[in-house]
Amino acid sequence: MKSKNKLQMSHEVQSSSRKQTVSVLAIWLSSAALAIIIALVIGNALGDRAALLGGTSSFAPPIYEYEGETVQPVDAWHVSLSGQTVESITSAIESLPRSVSSVSLYLRSGEKAPEYYSPVYAAVTGRLSAGVSLPEVVDLMHSKGLYVIGCFDLNSAHLAGSSAGSALASFETALLCEAAESGIDELIITNLPSGESGISAVSSIFKAIRAKNASIVLGAGIGYSVMLSDAGASSLLSYSKFADFCAVDASGARASGTSAVAIVTELEYLFRSYPLRLLFESSDVTDRQTQADALKQLGITNIQSHKLTTITTAPAG
C-alpha cells in the first residue's frame, strides 16, 4: 500500500510539474507574440509617417545611430561682412533686436574669395581679398556679448579623389584653419557632398581644423535637397560621426519662394527626432522675423539666418 501511494504521489508531482511548465511556456509565448505585434504596429506607423514625407521607413534612421552632440540651440541673426567696415558692422550689430545673443557671418560663398581680408587667400592667389579683419570683427562681437558663428561653402570635397580636389582641399583647409584661429566660436561647413569619398574628405578637413582650435564647435550643413533624397539618412548618420552637430542648409530655397516653414514641414520627422539646426535665408529683417516666428510656433527653436537673398518668385509658403 505504501509503495502504491508513493507511485501515485510521484505521478501527481510529475503531472503538476508538467502543468507548470506548460503554463510558463504559454505565458512566454503570449508575451513574445505581444512583443511582435507591438513591433509590427510601431514599424507600420513609422513606415506610414515616412511615406507621408515622401520616403520610406528607412528615410529616418534610428535615433540611437545618430552620434551628433546636442549643441545649445541658437537663434542667430545674419550680419554681412561683404563690403563692410568695422564702423558699419558696429552699426549693424547695434541695430539688432536687444534679445539677439548670437550672430552668423557668411565667410565664403561658393567659389568666391572670402568676405573678409584673408592673408592665406592673398598668399596663395597673389590677390588681395578686400574686407575687414576677421579677428577684429570677432573681438568686436565678443565685446558685445555675442556668440559668433561662421559659415563656409566647401568645394573640394565634391572633387575628392582627384588631383584638383587634393590641391583645392589644401587651400580650403588653410582658409578654414585661418578662420578657426580668429577666435570665432563655431564654424558650419556647407555645400557638402553625399558620396562616401566626399564625406571622408570632409572628415579629414574637420580633423585639421580641430588641430588648430580644439575648442571650436564644428557643424555639418547638409543641403535640404540631399536630405529629401535617398541619400539623406545615410548622409546624416555619416556626418554625425565627426561633426559636433548637423544642420539642414536651406540655401537657395527662399529665392524660389520656399519658406523655412515649408522646408521644416517636408522634413518634419527628422526635426522632431534629431537635434538639427535649420540654416535659412531671408530677404530682409521683416522676412527674417516672420519666418522665425512661424518656426517657433512649430517648436523649431534652433535656427540661423545665415545670409540674405532676393525672392525672385512668389512665396510658396
Image (cartoon, rainbow, N blue to C red):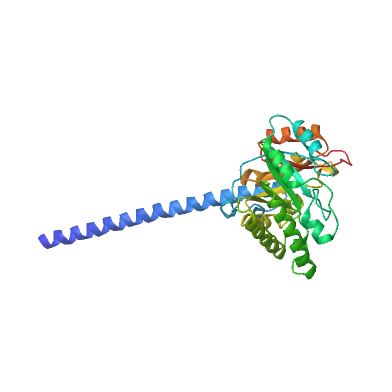
Q: Which residue lies furthest to the right in this view?
A: 312
* Residue 28 in sight: yes
Asked whether 162 or 127 is in front, the reply is: 127
* Residue 1 in sight: no
Residue 199 coordinates in the image, percent (x, y): 69, 61
**Figure check: 96 above or below 274:** above
**Figure check: 291 above or below 205:** above
Asked whether 257 or 25 is in front, the reply is: 257
Asked whether 292 or 142 is in front, the reply is: 142
Q: Which residue lies furthest to the left in this view?
A: 1
Q: Quadrant of residue 88?
A: top right
At a point 78% along the width and 63% down the height, the residue shown is 168
At a point 35% along the width and 53% down the height, the residue shown is 23
Q: In which quarter of the image is residue 202?
A: bottom right
Residue 34 coordinates in the image, percent (x, y): 48, 50
Residue 201 coordinates in the image, percent (x, y): 70, 63
At a point 80% along the width and 57% down the height, the residue shown is 121
Q: In which quarter of the image is residue 149?
A: top right
**Figure check: 293 above or below 215:** above
Q: Which corner quadrant holds the C terminus?
A: top right
Q: In this view, does 98 lie to the left or right of 64?
A: right
Residue 95 coordinates in the image, percent (x, y): 77, 30
Q: In this view, does 11 lie to the left or right of 86?
A: left
